[in-house]
Amino acid sequence: MHAVILAGGKGVRLLPYTTALPKPLVPIGDQHAILEIVMRQLANAGFTTCTIAIGHLGHIIRAYVGNGSQWGMRVGYSTEDSPLGTMGPLLTMLDRLPEKFLVMNGDILTDLDFGDVLRHHETADSPLTIATYARKVKIDFGVLTTDSGNVVAFTEKPSIDYRVSMGVYGLSRSTLLDYTPGLPLGFDEVVLDLLNAKTPPSAYDFDGYWLDIGRPDDYDRANAEFTTHRGLLLKGA
């Protein structure tokens, strides 16, 4: 099984932590970098090869991960010279990828079974599989529905339930063949194109532990929770 880790972003939302380190290498619990946890999880899930898309401070990631042998994996790299979006880096390495592979952001903490996501994609008749997570937003106001200048409905401080993308995908190489390498391409564009073509992605619903480390408060929460969740995140790894 092959995984692609997207690790080329500048991590501007996580400043000042990312002033000297790329976001995937910021430490969690003073013991492990985020990327180390991800690599250990991938190896434990049965992945033997991996490509890391690097850009900003990519030489530090390359020096830290090396060839991946410390985790029993073979790791290669793809360098992003200019920002290419979420999916754009994949277009520059398509000739090196298998038909079905895993794609994930390099800055998430989760006990998701990455191998099961890829196996789900391999058996699903869809071009893209998206790992999804349930979120709830509490509205702190009374919500009004109006029509023609009249209030027709009222709900006091409702909660909105929805599912979000976890930043982990099962992807088929053929899904990206019609896009132009070297041009920016976002995850949102791919999903909308698939919906418009009436070839919708499949969903892999997950309700375990997931934290997207995008902002300083997310990072602080990750460090605060790591001791409690260490066994969960590194089980078998």
Image (spheres, grey):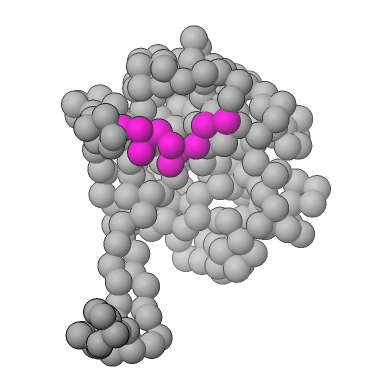
**Which of these two is toward me, 144 or 29?**
144
How far across and how far down the image is residue 14, in percent?
Answer: 67, 57
How far across and how far down the image is residue 23, in percent?
Answer: 66, 47
**Which of these two is toward me, 217 or 146?**
146
What span is colored magenta in the figure?
Answer: 184-194
Q: Residue at x 42, y 56 (%)?
A: 210
Image height of 53 relative to 57, above or below: above
Q: Residue furthest right?
A: 20
**Which of these two is toward me, 124 or 43?**
124
How far across and how far down the image is residue 195, in percent?
Answer: 28, 37
How far across and how far down the image is residue 9, in percent?
Answer: 65, 41
Pick the quarter of the image with the C terminus. top left
Image height of 7 relative to 1, above or below: below
Q: Residue at x 25, y 25 (%)?
A: 122
Image height of 179 relative to 103, above or below: above
Image height of 121 relative to 176, above or below: below
On the question of residue 205 being in view, the answer is: yes
Q: Is residue 183 magenta?
A: no
